[in-house]
Image (tube, rainbow, N blue to C red):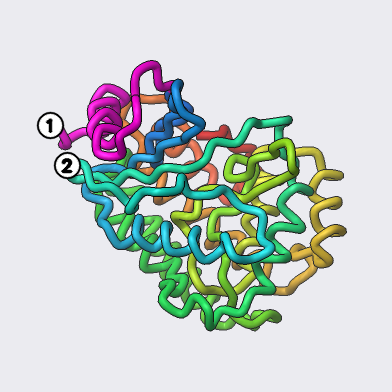
Amino acid sequence: MRTATFTPETSLELLEAACRAADLDPSGARLLRHHTNAVYRLAHHPVVVKITRPGSGQHRSAQTVAIAEALAHTSVPTVRLWPGLNQPIIVADSHATFWSAIDVAREPTAADLAEPLRRLHCLDPQALSAVSKLDPFGAIANSLTRRTVLNPHDLGFLRAYSEQLADDYATLDFERPSSLIHGDAHHSNMLVGPDGPVLADWESAHLGPPEWDLATVAVHCRRFDHPPDEYKEFAKIYGRDICDWPGYQTLAAVRELRMITTNAWKSAPGTPAAAEVILRVAALRRGDLERRWQLL
């Protein structure tokens, strides 16, 4: 089985192998998304299958499964694992997880994230002590060592910028104690089904400051041009506007750098995604912090 590249063609091979191991029929599966993971909706079962990039490591997938299993016993509305399987299922150098599909009722808004995140941040972190701690600069440094669509000049700039932000980040005075955080809370990682909003995509979950999730929502609303009233409603329901916190600008800058560096290695050269990453770095170099981003 081919694993050197991560394309819809090779991912389909992985899907077929994973479904054979799970005793599910992959025929007619529909590709929903292909970026961080390959995500398929099966045609003959109410199941969504997520397949990681080759070489992503089993720990992350195993932790995602452990978090999903733990959250199933809480009040946090979240997607559920497909029952009866020992997950994740290893296929070649990737890992597959199987989830109960949700029939989407409408597109989510930022406000839909507020109550699920509030409940998540109120959980006792001691119950999830095995979850790894947030390390934003470790992730950024790792991304900058990979083969990316950026030239050496831009990579040097981002390394220096990361060092500057690391010094600023170390001085932040977080107002909330560390908790389980989603890690990548935004519109695309939320589904609104018949029973209301649920959080999805737990691969970035860590123990860390709740401010990380709140800043992520604010950054996505601003960068991807969501209506201002949408963010205001989110802050009202959650009970806090992170933009009023003195550390917000630094945390938002760290969050945006994490997004840029991650997409720099995930995007294939010559694609629209690669072009968008290069434009983001160019805007950052000239100090343009308000440029609207295209969704990747």
Q: Position of residue 157 (x, y in %)?
A: 39, 56
* Residue stretch rendered in magenta on the structure: 1-30
Q: Position of residue 260 (x, y in %)?
A: 46, 48
Numbered circle sitting on residue 246 = none
Residue lying furthest left in this view? Answer: 1
Q: Amino acid at mark 1?
A: Met
Q: Position of residue 287 (x, y in %)?
A: 58, 51
Q: From the viewer's perspective, is 48 left or right of 264?
A: right
> Is 272 above or below relative to 85?
above
Q: Residue at 72%, 30% (x, y): give it.
A: 105
Q: Residue at 19%, 45% (x, y): give it.
A: 93
Q: Residue at 30%, 31% (x, y): give it.
A: 15
Q: From the viewer's perspective, is 263 left or right of 210?
A: left
Do the numbered discs 2 and 1 sit on residues whose CB atoms are within 8 Å? yes
Residue wearing tag 1: 1
Residue lying furthest top in this view? Answer: 28
Residue wearing tag 2: 92
> Is 201 above or below relative to 10?
below
Q: In this rendered view, identify the residue nearer to me: 228 or 213.
A: 213
Q: In this rendered view, identify the residue nearer to me: 37 or 143.
A: 37
Q: Amino acid at mark 2?
A: Ala
Determine crowd level at label 2: few under 14, some 14-19, many 20+ residues with C-alpha closer than 10 A. some
Q: In this rendered view, identify the residue nearer to me: 165 or 147.
A: 147
